Amino acid sequence: MKKKIVIALGGNALGNTLEEQMSAVKATAKAIVDLIEDGNEVVISHGNGPQVGMINVAMSELHNLHSKYSLCPMSVCVAMSQGYVGYDLQNQIKEELLNRNINKGVATIITQVEVNPKDSAFENPTKPIGSFMTKEESEVAIKNGDKVVEDSGRGYRRIVASPKPISIVEIETIKSLISAGQVVIACGGGGIPVIKEGNKLRGVEAVIDKDFASCTLAKELGADCLIILTAVEKVAINFGTENEKWLNEVTTFDMKKYVEEGHFAPGSMRPKVEAAIDFASSKEDRYALITLLEKAKDGISRKTGTRIK
Ligand code: ADP
Ligand code: MG
């Protein structure tokens, strides 16, 4: 049966460098077009950790070398990363569609996502951004107004807030394109975080978790299914221990209990599980799936993956 699916791509679907992304996206495009070929309506979102980190470092270096270029705001770095990742994705997906004689347009929407200026995340920044710095470099960053933390003996890193998404600003544009049969890439890197000031939307120094933004996108689109593709085939409880147990089909009720028991690492598996619970409990007949890129199709047909319902 034809379904409306939001696919959230994780780090391993995109790679870490320009070359890695080029080749990773080829495989990613194949997996996505498999689902389109089956008649599903597919909307794609993606993470941007390494990409936004690279852009952020490049823009900071530019500022260090030539002071006439001011520091690039995080919101602009996220916008650049959406353009960069979106370009590779739409290029490869289009090629794969043509290879299979499917006539469909593919477009990336630079997406802004509204956040609440009173979100408690702004008082307590948690998200490390960019490359590791030496103590000296961290002092310069602090002078430039950044918040910096020491990261478990590996060096210093800049941290920014990770507020919760409220709504997708470009949702009507995305819906129009989907109605016209187009493949849409949206909410890259969790979207560009903006706050509403009357008619004005102002970009803020923050990054939104891509799993939460993908959940908001899927709910606003009325999707049937949210697929979170990551580096593991299934989610486990007691992960990495001898009592490790891989999960197949789980109710949102049981999954909430596992979250409370601390089975999922914050910043990696936990936001995925929380986004999956949020989406699956938002309406009857909705489910979320967490699995590997290559297993997306098998996951939909209940052969593998962790299904949260
Ligand atoms: P992505 O880049 O796809 O967003 P992350 O690397 O942030 O993904 O998170 C996925 C990783 O989370 C897995 O590769 C795995 O090592 C880790 N992980 C932490 N807790 C669990 C768990 N309970 N079950 C499965 N994987 C887990
Ligand atoms: Mg990762």
Image (cartoon, grey):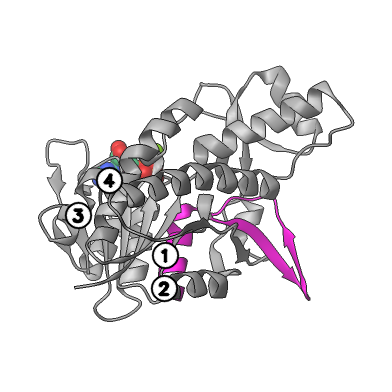
Asked whether residue 149 is in view, the answer is no
* Residue assigned mark 2: 219
Is 77 positioned to the left or the right of 306 in the image? right
Q: Residues within 10 Å of mark 4 (few under 14, many from 20)?
A: many
How far is disc 2 from disc 4 in space, using C-alphas? 22 Å
Where disc 3 sits, the SS reads helix
- What amino acid does circle 3 point to? Lys
Q: Which residue is mark 4?
A: 293
Residue numbers of the magenta segment = 191-220
Q: Who's the residue at 43% across and 33% down the image?
A: 22
- Which residue carries the number 1 mark? 215
Q: Provide the residue designation for mark 3.
A: 297
How far apart are the two marked residues, 3 and 2, measured between alpha carbons? 21 Å
Going from N to C along the chain, the mark reached first, 2 or 4, is 2
Question: Residue 143, how many percent across, how many down?
Answer: 81, 31
Q: Tell me the amino acid under the disc marked 2.
A: Lys
Residue closer to the observer: 60 or 296: 296
Whether 215 is among the magenta residues is yes
Q: Which mark's residue is nearer the viewer, 3 or 2?
A: 3
